[in-house]
């Protein structure tokens, strides 16, 4: 079998008096391919010559003349691409993980043959482009790498409604920002701004007119490829949550041990510090000092003269805290800072010496198994270790050494309480740590966030976290099962 011309129809009549045409089934019949072109998959458009790293591109070989029996072989010596269907008329070029060293650095060759014909070839230069989004040092709001730094398509960027942030963008392969397309799937949620003619830049991203929404920002090549996305990242737009509060630093001049270590703690400066982390979740703290001079407020609160604020957990603080609240009657959220605090639950029923269980005045307490805490007063005060509990009934690791009456206090070591006012204890912590604790407690009260066990969070259940960002990544809750996504949990107006 020979080849047949693609120009079907009756053979042209022989020229008058001329010689008989050569056998149309023979290689010399003029139906061998004389050339082959590389086109887009439609066979006519110019081909896209950009392959996204880890993306793909399809190209079609178009021989002249067309005809049956054409055979194709695509090949490349490039290490940046691999070929699928390399003996088909249409080849799929897959970008590997790395970008080209320069524009047009990869060469793809196609050879076309037919039985009895010599090969004709054509080649095209391709570029593998790689785009990487990452956190910008100039970002206005947040970036969560989801603790998977190597998988940036999982990452989340936060932006305030109708405001702008930046996403760092790096292009490898020789292209610049104007040669790619940046789009959001839902442009009512977010929109990218113009990219510059640079390969390493901050891409502006504008939050849309929405209180809460998520979309995908994509970088893609401008032509039509089956997989034209170079990379993507998630954009979360939020209405900014205001966290406005007044701070009173409270001592009792009649009780020397209530004197504050940091009576001049800078409330507005605290807000500035906390906002470096609150902004990640698109929240903005504003703190006002209750004292016109920025100093402490004197309240005679130490009614039991123990040198501490005695805080009745179940009853919203109890009598000593009520005295402070009456002296600090301002509208809105309030933060009270005191030198020390003793936070108490109380026995709901008397406990005998030798007992191994006790019942306290709430089932909704903050103890965890293994906690050791003081029970009782005066000569009967003893440390108990809570082995386990069911609701309000605590099982102790060892029998009680003393009998305790109903309403005997049992301590819970709290560094602060949320609510309104929030109460925060100086204790022995640093001034900086007290500031972070204000952010933590208002995080409970105003941002509706729970304590988490992730030790790199402002909402960690203990003080001292090194990194205190608000996160999109769901973090394990400390007092309850499950996780919490902080950006998504914050109530939006
Ligand atoms: Zn907490």
Image (tube, rainbow, N blue to C red):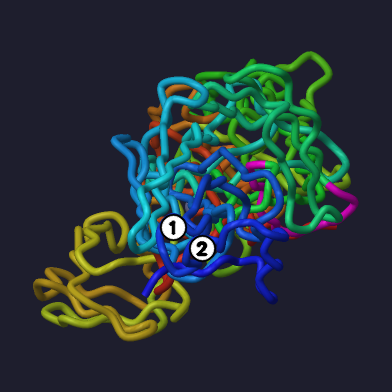
229 vs 318: above or below: above
- Residue 85, image quadrant: bottom left
How far across and how far down the image is residue 99, in percent? 42, 31
In depth, the one of 305 and 111 nearer the eye is 111
In depth, the one of 203 and 412 nearer the eye is 203
The span from disc 1 to disc 2 (Cα, nearest Å) is: 5 Å
Q: Main secondary structure of the magenta part?
A: strand
310 vs 296: above or below: below
Asked if labels 2 and 1 touch by Cβ distance under 8 angstroms, the answer is yes
Q: Secondary structure at mark 2?
A: strand
Residue ID at (70%, 42%): 222
Residue 484: mark: 2
Q: Evaluate whether residue 298 shows in this view.
A: no
Q: Is residue 165 left or right of residue 317?
A: right
- Magenta stretch: residue 137 in it? no
- Residue 47, image quadrant: top right
Q: Identify residue for label 1.
A: 475
Q: Is residue 139 left or right of residue 20?
A: right
């Amino acid at each position: 079998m020979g080849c047949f011309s693609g120009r079907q129809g009756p053979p042209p009549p022989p020229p008058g008096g001329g010689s008989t045409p050569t056998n149309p089934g023979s290689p010399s019949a003029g139906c061998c391919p004389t050339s082959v072109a590389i086109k887009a998959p439609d066979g006519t458009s110019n081909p896209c010559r950009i392959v996204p790293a880890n993306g793909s591109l399809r190209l079609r070989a178009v021989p002249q003349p067309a005809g049956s029996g054409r055979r194709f072989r695509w090949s490349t010596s490039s290490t940046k691409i691999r070929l699928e269907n390399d003996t088909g008329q249409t080849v799929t070029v897959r970008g590997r993980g790395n970008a080209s060293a320069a524009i047009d650095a990869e060469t793809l060759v196609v050879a076309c043959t037919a039985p009895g014909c010599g090969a004709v070839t054509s080649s095209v230069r391709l570029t593998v482009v790689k785009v990487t989004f990452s956190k910008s040092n100039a970002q206005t709001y947040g970036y969560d790498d989801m603790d998977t730094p190597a998988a940036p398509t999982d990452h989340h960027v936060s932006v305030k409604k109708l405001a702008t942030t930046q996403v760092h963008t790096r292009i490898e392969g020789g292209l610049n920002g104007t040669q790619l397309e940046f789009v959001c799937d839902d442009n009512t949620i977010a929109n990218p701004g113009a990219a510059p003619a640079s390969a390493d830049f901050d891409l502006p991203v504008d939050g849309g007119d929405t209180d809460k929404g998520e979309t995908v920002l994509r970088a893609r090549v401008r032509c039509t490829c089956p997989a034209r996305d170079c990379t993507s990242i998630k954009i979360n737009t939020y209405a900014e949550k205001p966290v406005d509060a007044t701070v009173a630093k409270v001592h009792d001049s009649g009780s020397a041990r209530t004197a504050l270590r940091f009576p001049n703690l800078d409330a507005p400066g605290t807000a500035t510090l906390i906002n470096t982390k609150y902004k990640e979740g698109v929240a903005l703290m504003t703190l006002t000092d209750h004292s016109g001079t920025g100093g402490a407020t004197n309240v005679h609160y130490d009614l039991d003269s123990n040198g501490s604020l005695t805080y009745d957990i179940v009853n919203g603080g109890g009598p000593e805290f009520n005295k402070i609240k009456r002296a600090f009657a301002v509208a809105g959220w309030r933060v009270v800072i005191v030198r020390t605090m003793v936070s108490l639950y109380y026995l709901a029923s008397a406990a005998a010496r030798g007992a191994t269980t006790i019942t306290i005045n709430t089932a909704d307490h903050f103890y965890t198994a293994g906690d050791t805490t003081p029970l009782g007063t005066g000569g009967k005060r003893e440390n108990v270790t809570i082995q386990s509990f069911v609701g309000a009934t605590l099982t102790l690791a060892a029998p009680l050494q003393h009998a305790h009456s109903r309403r005997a206090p049992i301590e819970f070591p709290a560094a602060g309480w949320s609510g309104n006012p929030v109460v925060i204890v100086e204790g022995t912590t640093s001034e900086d740590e007290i500031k972070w604790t204000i952010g933590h407690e208002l995080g409970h009260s105003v941002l509706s966030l729970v304590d988490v066990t992730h030790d790199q969070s402002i909402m960690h259940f203990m003080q001292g976290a090194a990194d205190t960002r608000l996160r999109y990544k769901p973090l394990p809750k400390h007092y309850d099962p499950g996780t919490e996504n902080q950006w998504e949990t914050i109530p939006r107006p």
